[in-house]
Image: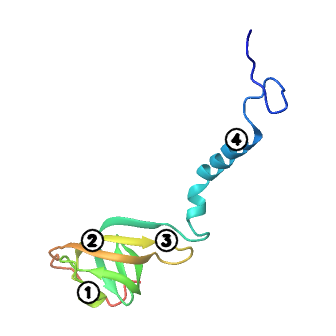
Amino acid sequence: MAVRDQDERGHPGQHMPSTQLLFLLVVFFLSAWGASFAQDPGEEPVISDPVTIEGKGDGGIVIAGQRYRVGESTAILDATGNRISLCDLSLPCEAEVEYRLEENLEPLCLRIEILRVLKSPPNFVITDDPG
């Protein structure tokens, strides 16, 4: 005699109770949209790039001709890992820069880590305000 699957009420053919189905649906939706829950709405992601810093000025640096804002909370580290000020940043230099793009504003630097200072070309000029 064959045994058939039956639910709690004895109905044949139902293999998954509704609580298990509901659980699977919840897991699916959480995994599909998990990244959007982890990030604050309206907050842009942090980007990290190796760059050559070409210039600096009042509250900013210049990378590939574009100005990036440097705030009081921006961590600037020299090649030995010591914290320095924007004034003490030697140019030109290669650096790892973490920044955030912000709508209608210049990108905001969160962290600048100097990898190495480059030799300046003879016509290299540092301006007071790259913007």
> Which residue lies under the disc numbered 2?
95
Secondary structure at badge 4 equals helix
Camera-nearest residue between 129 and 75 = 75
The span from disc 2 to disc 3 (Cα, nearest Å) is 18 Å
Measured in 3D between alpha carbons, the distance from the residue under mark 1 to the one under mark 4, in whole angstroms, is 57 Å
Residue hosting label 3: 101
Q: Which mark is first along the chain, 4 or 1?
A: 4
Is residue 102 shown left or right of residue 58?
right
Residue positioned 56% across, 73% down in the render: 103
Name the outermost residue toward the top: 1
Pointers 2 and 3 in contact (C-beta within 8 Å) = no
* Left or right: residue 98 compared with residue 13: left
Query: Residue 43, image x and y in percent?
Result: 56, 71
| Mark nearer the N terminus (3 vs 4) | 4
Question: Measuring 42% from the left and 66% from the top, which residue is drawn there?
Answer: 47
Mark nearest the camera among 1 and 2 is 1
Q: CA distance from mark 1 to mark 3?
A: 23 Å
Q: CA distance from mark 3 to mark 4?
A: 43 Å
Spot occupied by residue 27 in the image (x, y as percentages of width and height): 63, 48
Whichever of labels 1 and 2 marks the residue nearer the N terminus, that label is: 1
Horizontal side of 103 relative to 112 (left or right) equals right
Tell me the SS state at disc 2: strand
Circle 3/circle 4 CB separation < 8 Å: no
Of 127 and 9, nearer the camera is 9
Q: Which residue corresponds to mark 1?
A: 84
Q: Residue at x 68, y 49 (%)?
A: 26
What's the mark number on residue 109? none
**Disc 1 to disc 2, how far (Cα)?**
14 Å
Query: Badges 1 and 4: C-beta atoms under 8 Å apart?
Result: no
Q: Mark 4 near mark 2, Cβ–Cβ under 8 Å?
A: no
